[in-house]
Amino acid sequence: MPYTETYHYLEETQGFHCWEYRNRYNEKSKLYIPKWRVPEEIPRTVSVTVRMKNEYLPEAIISEKDAYKMPEIRNERIVIMADFISEHSSTVRYDARRYNRQIHSLYIPYSFFDTDEYPKSIEVVVEWNQSFTFLCHACNEITW
């Protein structure tokens, strides 16, 4: 079954933009995407879907060179395969395959997985949300 969550823009790092999601247990999941693959107007939120096993969509391979030649391509969703890299204190790290580095890393909380064994590969789909964000002072949270 696919997992889909809304990630919120967190920060710009050297060469990347980062979005974060926190689940109800306050566990963090972070997604790093190279600056060349992010739309010119950086979305405040992105929808991230993770699929395992036989649910995969076809990958869309876009290179950094393609993004500079045709900037509008940066607005298209990202569909990539990512491989297990390592376990961390509260997350599992997946990186995009070398031939399709449209994302750098995705850190997924352990609680996402049903067992202590993590899939060797997952599919990651990133949809750019074109909504505005604002702070709701009455409820002290960000709303869309």
Image: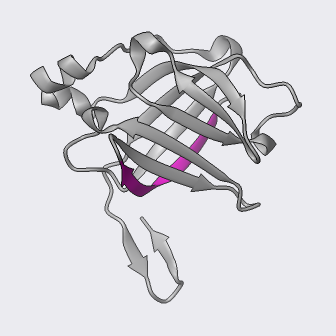
**Highlighted range, magenta:** 3-13
In the rendered image, the vertical position of residue 100 relative to residue 75, given as above or below = above
In this rendering, position of residue 135 left or right of residue 119: left
The residue lying at 88 percent from left, 31 percent from top is 116
- Report the quarter where the N terminus lies: top right
Q: Which residue is drawn at 30% across and 17% down?
A: 62
Specify whether 113 is left or right of 121.
right
Q: x, y (%) of residue 124?
A: 53, 27
Give how far across and how far down residue 11 sits, in percent: 40, 56
Is 31 in front, or is 89? 89
* Picture residue at 76% right of the left edge, 46% below the top: 89
**Left or right: where 34 falls relative to 10:** left
Q: Quadrant of the C terminus?
A: bottom left
Q: Where is residue 131 in the image (x, y as percent from the top left)?
A: 33, 56
Q: What secondary structure predominates along the stretch shown in magenta? A: strand
- On the question of residue 19 being in view, the answer is yes
91 in the magenta segment: no
Q: Which colour scheme is used?
A: one colour
Residue located farthest toward the right when viewing the structure as drawn? 115
**Residue 59 in view in this figure:** no
Residue closest to the eye, 76 or 27: 27
